[in-house]
Image (cartoon, rainbow, N blue to C red):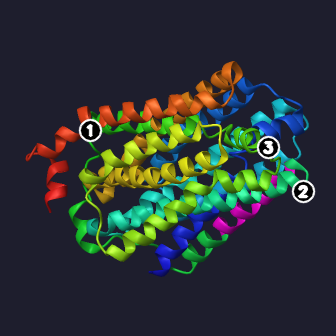
Amino acid sequence: MKPMKFWLIAMTLAAVVSDAMLLPFYPQFFERVFDIRDPHHVGAYIAACCAVVMLAFPFWARVARRVETLRLLIYTQLAAGLFSVLCWAAPTVAAFWALSLTMLVFKGSYLLVYPLLMEQETPDAHGRTIGLLSVVVHFGAIFGALLGGTVLQYFEPRQVYLVMVLGDLFQILVCLVLVYGKRQPDLPPATASADADAAPLAGSMILRLGAVMFLFYFAVYLARPFFARYWEQVSGLGSEVLAGAVFALPGAVAVLVLWLDFRRQQDRDVKAVLLPALLLCACGLLLQGADAVAVVLAGRMLYGWGLFRVTVGLDQLLYAFSRPASYATDFSKISVFQNLGVLCASFATGALVAMSGPRPTFMVAAAAIVGTLLLYQWLVRPLFSMPSSSFSRAFQE
């Protein structure tokens, strides 16, 4: 692995670990720190976080056209670290909302690393690189959930934000080394010259893929915020560390799937993988709604297998018909649909849990996955048979 690629992936891992530390534990965090037990409040907060990232990232993508990405990240992650410290010291819930959401404005800029990394790869390596990034995200979720659970179980919950600062400092250090060590990334000469004037994706293509991304991310995030609490109810165990481990189980499965793919030394055909993977996600979600520990664990593993395949496949579709010069712009547009899905899921899960408990979230999420499958068949699948489209040509090369 090239040094540049290694350090960009390491930055992504550090950022994901920070993001994942509280993701399974927001209900417990608000209850212990601010004595708030209302599921609506938790859902509204997660929705607000998604809205902030959704609105901030396109802004950073525009700024990155004029400012070198790594130099920009030095300042944004420094600001994120400072606001993390302020979150630790927030005296009221209102102050915590304001400070943590401001922190996310700056922290969300790390998403620029994703298209920057893809610019360094040739198109035939995109599938393996996206798979590696997906596993990094899952592995970050594993470590983040375990670390967050440990802090909540053995320390004062606010100290999670002090641990998050370490991730920000690591990203700043890497950026400083890459920038001032003269290791700035360069596009491969062929793609750099061919794509210097490439236009962003057409609006119709963004809308088609964005609609599928919206519903998929809605389904994925619907059952996440209250899973740790649901697991404690089903298992009868009150350990946050164990709950974090079960929450992160799909990430462990993703590592296994990536290992199997690397043994094949060949990217899987997106057209053949997405439909069965979506069905696997739906089945895994349904099993997680069962009132039995063994069935829930089996559902987590099936879900993790399908989730990895779908996440990688949908990202492959984006980079298949985008061009390196437009990666950041196109990725920022698609991320709006992804975050809209997460935002709507956050409101919906709070209402569902308040009304009927956490179990119905799995049923609704499975139905949304089936809807994603139908939407993909209707909007995206027909593009494979359009020989004049850049999308079709990308899969014929």
N-terminal of the pair, mark 3 or mark 2, is 2
> Dot 1: what SS?
helix
Q: Which image quadrant: the N terminus?
A: bottom left
Q: Where are the magenta residues, as a range?
A: 158-172
| Horizontal arrangement in the rendering, residue 158 relative to residue 181 (left or right) | right
| Horizontal arrangement in the rendering, residue 140 relative to residue 202 (left or right) | right
Which residue has dot 1 on it? 205
Is 169 covered by the magenta stretch? yes
Which residue has dot 2 on it? 154
Which amino acid type is shown beneath numbered disc 1?
Met
Residue 172 lies, in percent from the top left, at 66, 66
N-terminal of the pair, mark 3 or mark 1, is 1
Query: Which residue does the image show at 83% across and 47% down from the upper left?
Result: 238
> Dot 2: what SS?
helix
Which amino acid type is shown beneath numbered disc 2?
Tyr
Q: How far apart are marks 1 and 2 (CA)?
A: 49 Å
Which amino acid type is shown beneath numbered disc 3?
Gly
Q: Nearer the viewer, mark 1 or mark 2?
A: 2
Is 210 covered by the magenta stretch? no
Query: Which residue does the image show at 61% across and 72% down from the upper left?
Result: 174
Q: Distance between the residues labelled 3 and 2?
A: 19 Å
